[in-house]
Image (tube, rainbow, N blue to C red):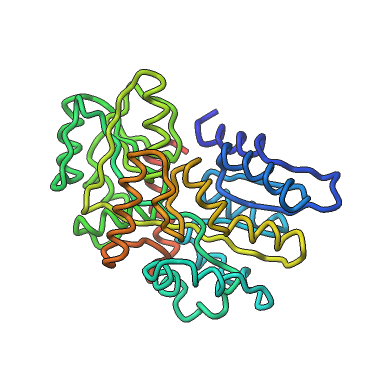
Amino acid sequence: MNIRKALILLSVIFSFQIAQSNDTVNLLMWWDKPLSLYLEKEVKTRCQVDLAYQGYVASDQFLYDFQIEDWDIIVFESTIFDLVKDKLLEKNINIKNNLMKEYPLFIRNQLNKQLGSSERDYNNLTFFSINNIVIVYDSKKISISDDTDIKSIINQLADTGKELVLLDDPNIINAILKVEGYNKMSLSSFETLFDYKNIIIQNYINGYENVGVMITWSSFALQYIIDAKDRGFEFELFEIPKYRFTTSTYIVQLRSNKSVNCVMNFMTSKDFMSKSSNLVFDFTPYANYEVVKNKRFYQLYKNFYKLGSKNDLKWVYQFSDLEESLYDSWGQILTMKKGV
């Protein structure tokens, strides 16, 4: 069984499906065990309901799960908004307007920009989590600075034989290719830029010995570095300005009743998001970095707020050129690199 299939199985194992309850809220969200355990406990206490939580580990799994079940609340990557937006409209649910008043101006402006002309129609939607793309690297083997680029990273890796780990996200890889001068993502452009044999494309990776460089979300990077240190491996984290893209997830309420409203109010509250930041190292739409306890995360979060306030973040969300060809190309790349 490959790692991706194993993770999908784990997401099912750690789903909290409580069919016996007459008062259950159905949640489809990115799989995260610590966050799901915290959510289950708090929802039971605060809302007196059971949480039927289904976790997924990749956007294609989300799209499948979203189609086959009925959900009360969903959380998904903003990059696939165009693929599901027609099924999200609930004009009688309004959570966004009150929440927006509590967000910093740059967050409010960005959410409206991402939703475009549809912003008034999606009052049941807001930001859930935000991340920057960062570099995790073995500083004993690799040197990283502001001016480092992909070719420099690969040249250094070639002398070590260590692995380059890329996140399984076609939108981010497409953004990297574009900033390097390629018009669009294709198997050819990918192989030209990432000309290295030891590449792993995977969102979650448990290995430490052979990783030289990893391009991933800031939240996973911090978790990975902490886990690696516990096992005797040292990694550093760096934000290369050229590749510091900002990504987000949306949370959407699809049904309205007392139980669902209670859960949604909690999951979009500053209290919950402050706790989740310290659990899983996500930025939140409140951008309240002062609540963060981890020193490295504090610096990342503070810099995110600083750059956002100056409108210097490079957000990646639904592309104007979002076409099936992007995902076709990504499928070819995965087949070539992963044999799936």
- Residue 171 is situated, as x and y percent measured from the top left of the image, at 38, 56
- Residue 28 is situated, as x and y percent measured from the top left of the image, at 63, 52
- Left or right relative to 35: residue 131: left
Most foreground residue, 192 or 291: 291
Which residue is at 68% across, 43% downward?
40
Q: How many marks?
A: 0
Which residue is at 61% across, 39% downward?
11
Most foreground residue, 250 or 305: 305
- Left or right relative to 178: residue 327: right
Most foreground residue, 179 or 100: 100
- Residue 16 is situated, as x and y percent measured from the top left of the image, at 71, 41
- Residue occupying the far front of the picture: 290
- Residue 167 is situated, as x and y percent measured from the top left of the image, at 38, 43
Q: The N terminus appears in which quarter of the rendering?
A: top right
Q: Is residue 84 above or below residue 271?
A: below
Quadrant hosting residue 107 = bottom left
Which residue is at 58% across, 52% downward?
62
Quadrant hosting residue 152 = top left
- Left or right relative to 76: residue 131: left
Most foreground residue, 233 or 216: 233
Q: Is residue 139 above or below residue 192?
A: above
Q: Is residue 155 above or below residue 262?
A: above
Quadrant hosting residue 206 = top left
